[in-house]
Image (spheres, grey):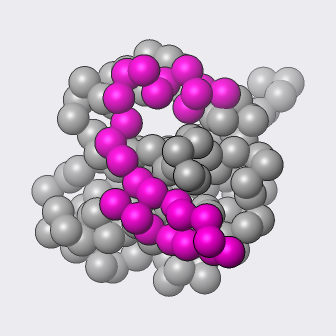
Amino acid sequence: MSVGNFSGVNLTLRDMINSDIECVLLIELQVHAHPWTRGNFSDALSSAYVCKIAELDGKIIGYGVLMQGVDDAELLDIGIAAQNQRQGWGRELLQAMLVLAHELRKQRVVLEVRASNAAAIGLYRSMDFVEIGLRRDYYPVENSHREDAILMGRQL
């Protein structure tokens, strides 16, 4: 599935497979302070979550993991390789994940984001996500401290 084209470069989306996990972990380590583990990704695949790979001309640059609920879908994890950020690819990947949720007949997509992640919050707001809750002390940070998670949602 082709999801975007900038300057003649195509972003495509495909199903994640087990052999992608190594590459996904490298990106995960770049972009998340407390990254998912190999086991988390393996579990997502075996649990039949919607796990997608974003490729630029055949090279993996990102991924998204969507868990289906009855009416909602939860975006559990999303990431774009550091060298490919701030080029519009994250927006394209997020939009593709929203389209997938819509095709699965979900009414809403929800997600959690660190309260300090201004760039991600800005992206989500620009794509019509609104704050719907707060999870206090949700994310671990250094020195045994915790950080709040903002719960955001968007109707489809």
Q: Quadrant of the C terminus?
A: bottom left
Task: Answer whether residue 5 is magenta in the image.
Answer: yes
Q: Is residue 62 above or below residue 72?
A: above
User: Which of 30/73 is in front?
Assistant: 30
Q: Is residue 96 above or below residue 144?
A: below
Task: Answer whether residue 63 is magenta in the image.
Answer: no
- Residue at the spot 33% in from the left edge and 79% down from the top edge: 155
- Residue at the spot 51% in from the left edge and 71% down from the top edge: 4
User: Which of 149/96 is in front?
Assistant: 96
- Residue at the spot 83% in from the left edge and 28% down from the top edge: 142
Q: Is residue 25 above or below residue 72?
A: above
Q: Which percent across, then down, holds residue 124? A: 58, 72
Task: Give residue 7's quadrant in the image.
Answer: bottom right
Q: Is residue 139 above or below residue 152?
A: above
Horizontal arrangement in the rendering, residue 22 relative to residue 76 (left or right): right
**Which region shows up in magenta?**
1-26
- Residue at the spot 25% in from the left edge and 24% down from the top edge: 46
| Residue 131 can be seen in this image | no
User: Which of 99/12 is in front?
Assistant: 12
Q: Kindly give the residue lying farthest to the right in the view shown.
A: 143
Horizontal arrangement in the rendering, residue 128 relative to residue 1 (left or right): right
| Residue 36 can be seen in this image | yes
Q: Quadrant of the N terminus?
A: bottom left
Q: Which percent across, then down, holds residue 84? A: 73, 54
